[in-house]
Image: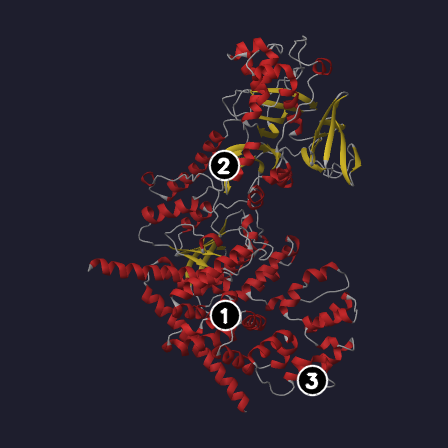
Amino acid sequence: MNAKARLISKISLKGLEIAPAQVWGSIRLVPLLRQNQNKNLRLFRRSYDEDIGVVNIDRQLAYISYIPHGLVLSWNNNETPQATLGSQLATDGKSLELKCCRSSVKIRMLNRMAKKESPNQLRFLPLHLAMEGFLSMYFSGPSIAWKEYPRRILSNGLNPRSEFSFLGSSISGFEDALRVFEIHENQVGILVFVAEALASAFIVPNSQDYRALHTSLLQDFYGELIYYYGMLRNTNYPMDVSVDESQINSLKDLKKAISKMRQDWAEFQVFMADSLLDRPLKAKKIQKTGRFTLERFITDLDPQKVNHIGEVIVSQNGDLEYLKSYRLSTAQTKRVYLLSQLAKYNWNLQDTAISLNISQNELVKRLERVGFGYLLKESVLDAARKNKL
Amino acid sequence: MSTILNWSVREEEVTREDLVMFVNACFACTGQKEFYSHGYGDRVSIDFLHEYILGNYRLLYARTLAAGINHFNTAQIILKLLATGKDTLPENKAEEGTLIAAALNSLPPQRAWKLLEQLKQRRINNRRSRAIVREYINQHKNINFQAVKYRSKLREIVSHIHLKLNGELGNFLFSGWQKRVYETELFEKFRQAHYSAEAIYELPYTVAEGLAYKHKIPRQIFLSRIESQMTLGEKLRLQKTAERTDKVKIELNWEKLPLTKLALYILSLSIKKRSENWHLFHEGLLKAARNILSKSPLKLGKVAAVLDCSYSSSGSSEKRRRPLGVALAAHYLLKIAAIEYKSFWTGDIKEPLLVTARGQTNLATPLLNAIEYNPDLIVIISDAWDNDPPNGAAEVLRIYRTKLDPKKSIAIAHFNPVFDTDNYNLRSISPLIPTLGLRDAEDLPTMLNFARFAEGSANLKELEEYLAGRVEQMLSKHTSSVFISENKTQI
């Protein structure tokens, strides 16, 4: 086998069947089915009931967030189905309790985003893995001591970097939509649309695991935009597929037309999800375990388009065994785009401004607007506000 | 001239639609939580519908009592009629009064007492309502037993209408166990039970339960000893409680349950238990179906049923598996009623008795298969949330009805066990077929008769005649039963 495994270049739903959506309020849920399921690969949820999770990425870097659950992937190499026992019982990290101001905060200290717990078991933190990658992206800091940056940054790096998101249960109507959703027999995944915008894609190895993880979608996090969409809309666009009766002369034709209806829905829903599917991706390998690779990805960060981050588990033959994605809001995309441009020109403000075809004043103001003001010296910000750079 | 004519035609049409909507709602809605809606919304919605029909078509509203509607709506109608007695036209007063009395008698006692108690809560106290309550209490065959079982309700009602009671009943209601001694046996038992733990076992279960707590009798001992006093419904309710402990076993005589209740009971059991007792249950359901048909005969030719067993047929916490239970019960009923019968489920169901509410709603495929079977009648039982593909069944019906079979050689009727709160109506699959409410499979023969009104093939006049006919039937039964009871008292 090729020693350096190929990373995924785009998400395709190969091997998956797309069933017609079920709509509830502004939420459209598209079931993804798989006929040949991998019984040797299982995915379980492990709940953490602490208020805050702290994950140490390396010696100097920690990721802090609300982490309600992790996922445990376990596999075996023979043909017998994987037993479920034990994978959820293992201890994971340490739980601390901090007392302050007459209340206490529980903290879970976790070791690494993805951790191999035994030869055939891997624990990872869904979406946090992708988010951590997103946060650290282009955030290395300048290697030349440009005068615009304060000394703190030059000596300690650019920390901290933060983003905020909304919990699934806060999206209006999402809980009810998941409750009344009728899970298909072979369903392994789902595409979540809120007001016709793709909020997330979720795929697991087999249907049994999907049934167990269906409600876990409520505990994942979603972008700001999705939250507002859910709040502002309570219906969907009325969409209908109908049959052309002039083509139908017998019951057999009608049967064919109905299966064509299903196909039309599937095609249309792929079109609706085109911001994620078949987009060029930038992927990074996180763990390689036997026959599967855990990778995280980000779409091409085109500021004109909708971008997603996420993580996948891909088997050797290229099948998607697991996928979870997060739609970046426009502000988030803008932030990371600015960072990427800065990184490209080695954090030189002048060069970056020229490449973006704006003045240096404008670039500094733009950095401040998207929330990166803390990276620059106060005097530089003041000067830019007065257009005196 | 023609516009006036059109207006009156349109008016009739609206009246017919309103009434069909109302009767349908009265068959399906119980003001309880459904899979897709919350109970509160349901109650607001059905209450509005009642007010609307009462305000616009009072006589027909009263006559709906005879249509065979469910108990919840019967109680609602009686209450609303009694509250607004002065709006009744003089010529309708007698009919309305007898209808209320007859409908009240047809309710199970717990429903009837609860309804009468609401008269006090809603401050309804007119001459007619007093007369109806008095009549109801006087004609009750076993009023002493009722007084023990529903003592607080009966007391409220009697004090509300200032009714003078004969014998020990008044003393019993108002002084209870504090009196020294009763001559009536049951009252005496009730009194004794407040002092002796042994005496409680001769009281009705619900009364004994509270006293058992008072005497601190362990639950297991209490349950095993009170078993003989339990009604069938109580035994059914306590099956799961009894299963939790080894020592108590409540024998349920499930063969006596009516069809839909039996289907719901069987569906509450595990697949393992159902397949172990497959033969027993199968025969039991067939027998229950035959019982219904002996009472209300229904003879059908070649029939196909499209039955929904999707996840939404699991109902709600208040109506567990009701839609699925109705589908299973209807399956057995149609099996007996039809000469030739075949069922088509939305899921992959090989044995109907082992069905579970699972998966998406794919109505189009079973419907197409049913059409291919070429029956005389297709019965669809579903909540009409078709989602694989959405509108699939609607498209099948549209093209089949308009193009492939415009002469309607196959009759198709859709029965919906779920009330759609937002639209005050039942969710329909397609406007081309009639949609009918169905809470109990027992009502299937009645509703099949009603289908022509929902479809629009019969006009308002026919609907009025139909209702009047039902009223006549109901009243003739009622007066004969009153006559018999009067005779008995004379003897």
Q: Residue at x 36, y 57 (%)?
A: B455
Contact flag, marks 2 and 1 (Cβ < 8 Å): no
Left or right: residue A191 versus residue A65 is: left
Q: Identify the secondary structure beneath mark 2.
A: loop
Residue with the mark numbered 1: B79
**Marks 3 and 1, how far apart at CA:** 34 Å
**Marks 3 and 2, how far apart at CA:** 69 Å
Q: Residue furthest bottom?
A: B491
Q: Identify the secondary structure beneath mark 1.
A: helix
Q: Which one is nearer the viewer's eye here, B430 or B2?
A: B2
How many numbered marks does the figure carry?
A: 3
B383, above or below B461, in the image = above
**Marks 2 and 1, how far apart at CA:** 44 Å
Where residue A348 sits, quadrant-wise, is top right
Q: Is residue B290 visible?
A: yes
Tag 3 and tag 1 share a subunit: yes
Where residue B469 sits, quadrant-wise, is bottom left
Frontmost of labels 3 and 2 is 2
Residue with the mark numbered 2: A195
Left or right: residue A81 versus residue B439 is: right
Locate residue B243, reporting x and y percent: 72, 60
Q: Residue at x 68, y 70 (%)?
A: B206
Residue with the mark numbered 3: B185
Locate residue A306, reporting x and y percent: 52, 25
Q: Residue furthest left?
A: B1
